[in-house]
Image (cartoon, rainbow, N blue to C red):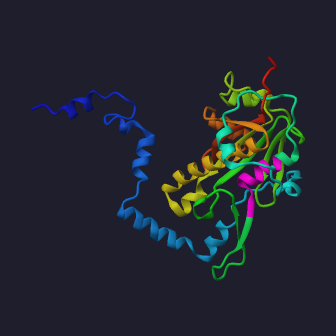
């Protein structure tokens, strides 16, 4: 008797069917990063070894910095919060904004709230490990092991800051000014936004990168999954904060990774772009 399942399997030409799964890098990674009893025990031994005083101290300060870059201090505004913002209303009202008001400049307090409340350090805790003098800085979003593998870069198009590329320092709530100038045309070539999203009239483009070593050193292959989770947490949090400020946002999945990496000055291997978020003032509806 012919096995119908085998017949359908051989006829399956979908990208992720049984026949083609070996050709899918995504499926291969997913299969090879699954836990079983052996791999979980092996990873457990690695995690236990991670709690040495040296590694604990090194991993507790996951902050990239540009020491020679000019800085803008956002800390005076970091504890501001929009009045009357209801979480469930924000969830209900949030949607992808594709048209922005080019007349509006995002204020420095708005910029501070967007960055600080999404990925800035909001509380500190002393490290209790013997032989370690230091603290861990925690943030609003969950991060496996408190390792925080992401870095936030902001391309300012329309705000009260000078146009250009900035890096956000989560530990000091500062912007480090990396590259002055209007980078609109460069962004248009790197990000597949138009004609669906009016990128040139937005206020900011937030580029999130991931440093895989921060996760992999403790969680191995599984750490890449965790890093992608965290990138999503940050983007959604920032999108909801934008909504609370009366701003709109739109996440973009289509972009030229290595061109963005080159623009940011990162190597594209150990640190690489993970997410693109466009933010600006919502375009008011035209009068009837």
Q: Does 102 lie within the magenta span? A: no
Q: Observer-nearest residue: 159 or 131?
A: 159
Instruction: Report the residue that reaches farthest toward the left.
Output: 1
Q: Is 161 placed above or below 193 here?
A: below
- Dividing the picture into quadrants, the one containing residue 263 is top right
The residue drawn where x is 52% and y is 51% is 225
- Dividing the picture into quadrants, the one containing residue 162 is top right
Q: Position of residue 80 (x, y in %)?
A: 83, 54
> The N terminus appears in which quarter of the rendering?
top left
Instruction: Report the residue that reaches farthest toward the bottom.
Output: 130
Q: Is 239 placed above or below 252 here?
A: below
In the picture, measured across the screen, residue 174 lies left or right of residue 131, that is: right
In the picture, measured across the screen, residue 3 lies left or right of residue 272, that is: left
Q: Position of residue 193 (x, y in %)?
A: 67, 27
Q: Position of residue 126 (x, y in %)?
A: 71, 75
Q: Main secondary structure of the magenta part?
A: helix
Q: Is 243 placed above or below 287 here?
A: below
Q: Does 121 lie within the magenta span? A: yes
The residue drawn where x is 44% and y is 47% is 29
How many marks can you see? 0
The residue drawn where x is 63% and y is 79% is 129
Q: Observer-nearest residue: 3 or 263?
A: 3
Residues drawn in magenta: 111-122
> The C terminus appears in which quarter of the rendering?
top right
């Amino acid at each position: 008797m012919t096995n119908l399942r085998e017949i359908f399997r051989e006829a399956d030409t979908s990208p992720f069917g049984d026949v083609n799964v070996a050709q899918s890098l995504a499926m291969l990674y997913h299969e090879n990063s699954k836990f079983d009893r052996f791999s979980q025990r092996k990873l457990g031994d690695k995690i236990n070894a991670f709690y040495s005083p040296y590694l604990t101290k090194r991993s507790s300060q996951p902050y990239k910095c540009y020491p020679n870059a000019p800085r803008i201090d956002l800390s005076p505004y970091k504890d501001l919060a929009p009045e009357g913002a209801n979480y469930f209303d924000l969830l209900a009202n949030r949607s992808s904004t594709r048209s922005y008001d080019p007349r509006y400049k995002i204020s420095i307090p708005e910029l501070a709230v967007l960055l600080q409340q999404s990925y800035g350090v909001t509380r500190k805790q002393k490290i209790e490990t013997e032989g370690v003098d230091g603290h861990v800085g925690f943030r609003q979003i969950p991060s496996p092991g408190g390792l925080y593998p992401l870095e936030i870069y902001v391309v300012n198009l329309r705000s009260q800051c000078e146009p250009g590329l900035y890096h956000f320092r989560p530990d000091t709530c500062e912007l480090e000014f990396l590259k002055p100038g209007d980078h609109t045309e460069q962004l248009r070539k790197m990000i597949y936004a138009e004609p669906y999203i009016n990128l040139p009239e937005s206020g900011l483009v937030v580029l999130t990168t991931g440093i895989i070593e921060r996760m992999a050193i403790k969680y191995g292959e599984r750490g890449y999954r965790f890093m992608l989770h965290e990138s999503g947490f940050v983007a959604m949090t920032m999108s909801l904060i934008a909504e609370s400020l009366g701003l709109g946002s739109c996440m973009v999945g289509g972009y030229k990774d290595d061109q963005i990496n080159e623009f940011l000055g990162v190597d594209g291997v150990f640190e690489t772009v993970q997410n693109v978020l466009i933010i600006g003032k919502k375009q008011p509806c035209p009068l009837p």
